[in-house]
Amino acid sequence: MLQILFLAAVAAIVLYQLYATLGRRVGRQPEDAPATAVSGPTGSAPTDSHPVLRSEGLAALKSKQPDFDPNKFVTGARTAYEQIVSAYAEGDRETLRPLLSAEVMANFEQAMAAREAAGRTEKVEFLTPPRLDLESIDVEGDSAKAVVRILAEVRTRTKDERGEGVDDRRTAELWTFEREVKSANPNWFLTFVAAAEA
């Protein structure tokens, strides 16, 4: 009985990660939001009115990492987003590992292994360039956390023994990236994914 409950809990976690990663249809669509810019883990450019430019979190981060550039951060985050979504669909562990925290990688690994065991393959296409906004920056000690809102329109092609299925989706998600500011490694790691409010 305990084993069944444990397996059910693991399945729930995997399904949540799949849902969070691939997103859901929401009321707020990519074309409804103005393009904004930021760079880091992995772009566009915020104006002076962008809220993050006035945030205490940004000031705290720049006090520890003076060369931090919000514009470059968003550019990097966009690249990371596209790489992660594509690599997850293709089961490309080598690309995913340096971009994800250990916990997120473990959850993705479970989901990819389950998909492979079922004989299913996936491919993802971006129908429009993803739009990103830097929502917030928080610094605790030497740990920095940046939350990015991502609006995207994707097409997922799934193949299994029954044939191919095609699903077009518009998604809104919040991706959280973190890094240790004193680390020699400049990369930010994806530590959490959540569906954003419409």
Image (cartoon, rainbow, N blue to C red):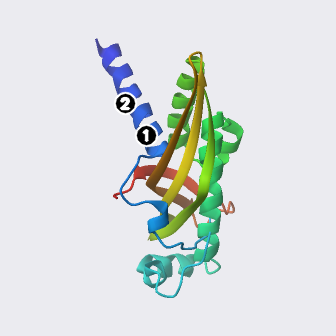
- 83, 181: nearer the viewer: 83
The quarter of the picture where the N terminus appears is top left
**The image quarter in which residue 70 lies:** bottom right
Label 2 crowding class (10 Å Cα cut-off): few <14, some 14-19, many 20+?
Answer: few
Q: Could you tell me if residue 177 is visible in this image?
A: yes
The quarter of the picture where the C terminus appears is bottom left
In the picture as drawn, the residue positioned furthest to the left comes out as 1
Q: At which x and y percent is residue 111?
A: 52, 30
Q: Earlier in the sequence, mark 2 or mark 1?
A: 2
**The image quarter in which residue 29 lies:** bottom left
- 2, 40: nearer the viewer: 40
Structural distance between the alpha carbons of marks 2 and 1: 10 Å
- Which disc is residue 12 wearing? 2
Can you tell which of label 2 and label 1 is closer to the viewer? 1
Q: At which x and y percent is residue 114?
A: 53, 23
Q: At which x and y percent is residue 92?
A: 68, 36
Residue at point 69%, 63% (across, down):
184
Q: Which residue is mark 1?
A: 19
Helix, strand or loop at mark 1: helix
Amino acid under label 2? Ala
Amino acid under label 1? Tyr
